[in-house]
């Protein structure tokens, strides 16, 4: 039995045990009458592994519901992100689809045979979520039938045709075949249906549609088809089981409602560049044969952005390309996208899961720096949410508004309160009452009285909420301050947020200190623009952030002082002109006058002094504002229940060290296979793990060979290694022949070559090691 099957079996037994425990507790706590209704809806959809037996049933259910709701929020945010970042591209795609086959002409489809199938090439289109969202949005239009196909699931032409028909039936409200999602064939309860190979499929399609290539003959044919029948009953969608019946469905509806009323068949294929060109060429030939009877639009998502349409030219022949009428579209993929992601998920998200610096750096690498895939970013976020709710029973307090927190606090038991007390931030909170406030009686109550701990939780949670809301406002101010201070050294939001996650926080980071230093050099007009922006940000967050209500009055005072200084400056400019006019009119009376330079210099000096005082006051204010509002998250009490800081599971899941896993399996087969014949490899008194002396003939041949390599140098003669291998194999089994031993040896050797443990040395009869270190 493989290690994977063993692990699955153990998890199945564990889940079954939790179900039994859950059912028994439900029967005990809620009674047999209510349990019948509750267990059907709750146990069936509840992940029992979240339930550990130490928390109330309602708390466990709330935890799972929060988990499920947060997963849906991730999908919603990703969808909105796609459409917002590619708003213009989405609009262009809509216009492209609507403009095809849109002329008021009965024979528009026939004309399309000259120009080719309308095809949208969407570059940067490897994002599954974007196409799923786009296809869902298209389905809202009754004049469109969107067929979404993942090319990675297409192994043959039949798969491509099957997915096309299946999705078309589903889009028309017939979903009885949804259960066949994992099957290569669709069961239509038709015993006469047989699977044909690709060549037979193509021949049948083309033979059935042998139309005259002359346009006039096609026109006459359509006129007869449309007007020559009195059957007003369209073909049922239930009877659409293949391409031929799909064409019949369109024909029957065209006879009744006309060609212009037919819904457009939009076939969306993402990861198109991973699709076998041979399969796709045959698929295009088939669609081309039917395009005069079905309004087909192709939308192909191509992951490569830089090669452009060359990705099509290099893989497909001209005879196929001429059947398609290309139009290129590009999805946005820039560093500003990652800024928007960080803002949505972490900065402006006051009630969601937060992450520490290690986890954030991983997310930054996976999308912001390496740009592997947005899908990887989404899966990483979902993995974080999964572990967060799985391992944190106190998560029921972190993802809900404070107005509804009281019922959840009432669900906390001594297990939850003990978890609160063991947090380092809570211990620091208790110590402050002794060391700073000199209130040991409150500290004693926090350590001994569970109800007292519950009573202060709303205050702690309110402070954390205010911290997150104030942080978002101050973060926006810091990011915008860069434009006014030094536009050449603007750092992206994802960089600033990484500074915020490091101790002592963004407010005391050297980059912010540099901005404040340069801030004192601002001119009057630049300062006015900054204060206007600062005030606008506060006004937009009056209902969201506590600091917006408390700080806006201070900003208005700064603004008024600046206006007074500007008025003084304007007065100093007008004064010399006025004095000059008076001097010319009274020059005969007065022989002397006040020098113009003295007046202007004194006014200028007064303006400079007042402006310097103002900008110094704002500088000192911003220093305190940023230090308090942008302090490190660890300064808050119970920050541990809001922030997920463990990154090892993410790295092992999304950036696995494959060779390390293989080597571990070769060195310690018992850990992976759990076989009874092998000794316990972890019970060694010394630091050696699996020494060569413990090699057993019952172990796998590859494990034996790998362990034998320990005693050899870099270059190994095959005969020497074979001799050592034979000694192990024949040690307890002397009946085995030399030929059988050699066959097993060479099979194991080839396997180790494939995984990179050994390689040919370039000299006949020798091999060499490829893995060193802790070999």
Image: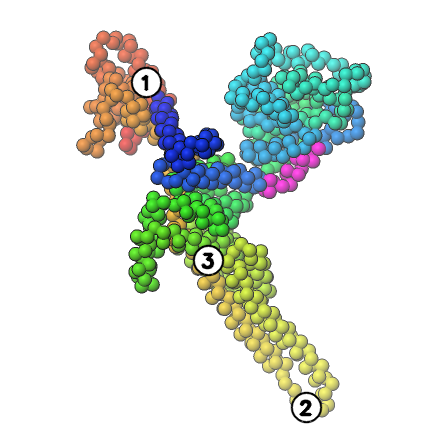
Residue to which mark 1 is pinned:
748
Circle 2 SS class:
loop
Residue to which mark 3 is pinned:
629
Mark 2 burial class by Cα count in 10 Å: few <14, some 14-19, many 20+: few
Mark toward the start of the polypeptide (2 vs 3): 2
Viewer-nearest residue: 106 or 553 = 553
Residue to which mark 2 is pinned:
591
Of badges 3 and 1, nearer the viewer stands 3
Circle 3 SS class:
helix
Residue at 53% x, 18% y is 184
Residue at 71% x, 14% y is 209
Q: How many numbered discs, if any?
A: 3
**Scheme by which the image is coloured:** rainbow
- On the picture, is 316 further left or further right than 619? right
Mark 3 burial class by Cα count in 10 Å: few <14, some 14-19, many 20+: many
Circle 1 SS class:
helix
> Splitting the image into 4 quarters, where does residue 662 fall?
top left
Residue interval drawn in magenta: 83-98
Q: Is residue 389 visible?
A: no
Confirm whether the magenta stretch covers residue 85. Answer: yes
């Amino acid at each position: 039995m493989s290690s994977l099957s063993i692990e699955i079996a153990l998890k199945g037994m564990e889940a079954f045990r939790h179900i039994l425990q859950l059912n028994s507790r439900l029967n005990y706590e809620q009674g047999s009458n209510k349990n019948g209704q509750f267990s059907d809806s709750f146990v069936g959809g509840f992940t029992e592994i979240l339930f550990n037996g130490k928390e109330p049933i309602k708390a466990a259910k709330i935890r799972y519901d929060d988990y499920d709701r947060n997963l849906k929020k991730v999908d919603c945010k990703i969808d909105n992100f796609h459409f917002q970042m590619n708003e213009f591209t989405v609009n262009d795609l809509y216009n492209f689809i609507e403009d095809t086959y849109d002329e008021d002409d009965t024979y528009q489809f026939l004309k399309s045979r000259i120009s080719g199938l309308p095809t949208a090439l969407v570059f940067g289109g490897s994002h599954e979520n974007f196409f799923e969202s786009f296809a869902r949005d298209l389905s809202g239009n009754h004049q469109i039938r969107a067929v979404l196909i993942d090319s990675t699931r297409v192994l043959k032409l039949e798969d491509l045709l099957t997915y096309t028909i299946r999705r078309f039936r589903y889009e028309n409200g017939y979903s009885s075949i949804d259960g066949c999602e994992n099957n290569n064939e669709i069961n239509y309860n038709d015993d006469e249906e047989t699977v044909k190979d690709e060549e037979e499929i193509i021949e049948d399609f083309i033979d059935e549609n042998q139309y005259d290539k002359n346009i006039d003959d096609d026109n006459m044919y359509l006129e007869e088809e449309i007007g020559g029948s009195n059957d007003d009953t369209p073909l049922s969608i239930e009877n659409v089981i293949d391409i031929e019946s799909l064409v019949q469905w369109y024909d029957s509806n065209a006879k009744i409602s006309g060609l212009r009323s037919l819904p457009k068949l939009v076939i969306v294929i993402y990861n198109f560049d991973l699709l076998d060109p041979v399969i796709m060429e045959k698929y295009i030939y088939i669609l081309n044969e039917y395009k005069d009877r079905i309004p087909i639009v192709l939308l192909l998502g191509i992951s490569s952005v830089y090669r452009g349409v060359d990705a099509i030219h290099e893989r497909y022949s001209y005879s196929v390309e001429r059947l398609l009428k290309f139009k290129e579209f590009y999805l946005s993929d820039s560093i500003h996208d990652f800024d928007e992601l960080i803002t949505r998920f972490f900065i402006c998200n006051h009630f969601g899961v937060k992450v520490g610096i290690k986890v954030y750096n991983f997310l930054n690498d996976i999308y912001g720096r390496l740009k592997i895939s947005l899908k990887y970013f989404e899966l990483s976020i979902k993995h974080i949410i999964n572990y967060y709710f799985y391992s944190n029973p106190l998560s029921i307090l972190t993802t809900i508004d404070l107005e509804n927190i009281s019922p959840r606090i009432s669900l906390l038991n001594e297990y939850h309160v003990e978890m609160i007390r063991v947090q380092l931030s809570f211990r620091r909170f208790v110590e402050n009452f002794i060391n700073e406030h000199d209130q040991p009686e409150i500290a004693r109550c926090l350590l001994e009285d569970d109800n007292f701990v519950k009573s202060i939780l709303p205050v702690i949670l309110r402070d954390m909420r205010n911290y997150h809301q104030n942080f978002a406002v101050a973060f926006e101010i810091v990011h915008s301050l860069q434009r006014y201070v030094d536009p050449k050294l603007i750092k992206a939001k994802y960089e600033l947020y990484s500074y915020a996650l490091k101790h002592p926080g963004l407010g005391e980071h050297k980059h912010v200190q540099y901005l404040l230093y340069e801030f004192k050099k601002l001119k009057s007009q630049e300062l006015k623009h900054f204060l206007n922006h600062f005030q606008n940000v506060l006004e937009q967050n009056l209902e969201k952030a506590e600091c917006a209500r408390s700080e806006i009055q201070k900003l208005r005072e700064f603004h008024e002082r600046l206006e007074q200084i500007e008025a003084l400056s304007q007065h100093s400019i007008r004064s010399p002109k006025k004095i000059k006019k008076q001097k010319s009119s009274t020059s005969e009376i007065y022989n002397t006058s006040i020098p113009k330079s003295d007046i202007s210099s004194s006014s200028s000096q007064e303006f400079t002094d007042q402006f310097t005082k103002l900008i110094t006051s704002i500088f000192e204010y911003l220093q305190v504002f940023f230090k308090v509002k942008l302090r490190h998250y660890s300064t808050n009490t119970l920050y541990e229940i809001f922030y997920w800081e463990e990154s090892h599971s993410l790295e092992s899941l999304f950036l696995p060290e494959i060779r390390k896993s293989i080597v571990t399996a070769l060195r310690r087969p018992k850990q992976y296979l759990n076989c009874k014949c092998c000794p316990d490899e972890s019970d060694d008194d010394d630091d050696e793990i699996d020494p060569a002396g413990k090699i057993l003939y019952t172990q796998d041949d590859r494990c034996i060979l790998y362990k034998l390599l320990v005693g050899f140098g870099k270059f190994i003669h095959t005969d020497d290694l074979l001799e050592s291998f034979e000694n192990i194999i024949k040690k307890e089994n002397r009946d085995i022949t030399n030929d059988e031993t050699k066959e097993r040896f060479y099979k194991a050797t080839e396997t180790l070559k494939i995984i990179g443990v050994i390689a040919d040395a370039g000299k006949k009869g020798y091999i060499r090691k490829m893995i060193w270190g802790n070999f």
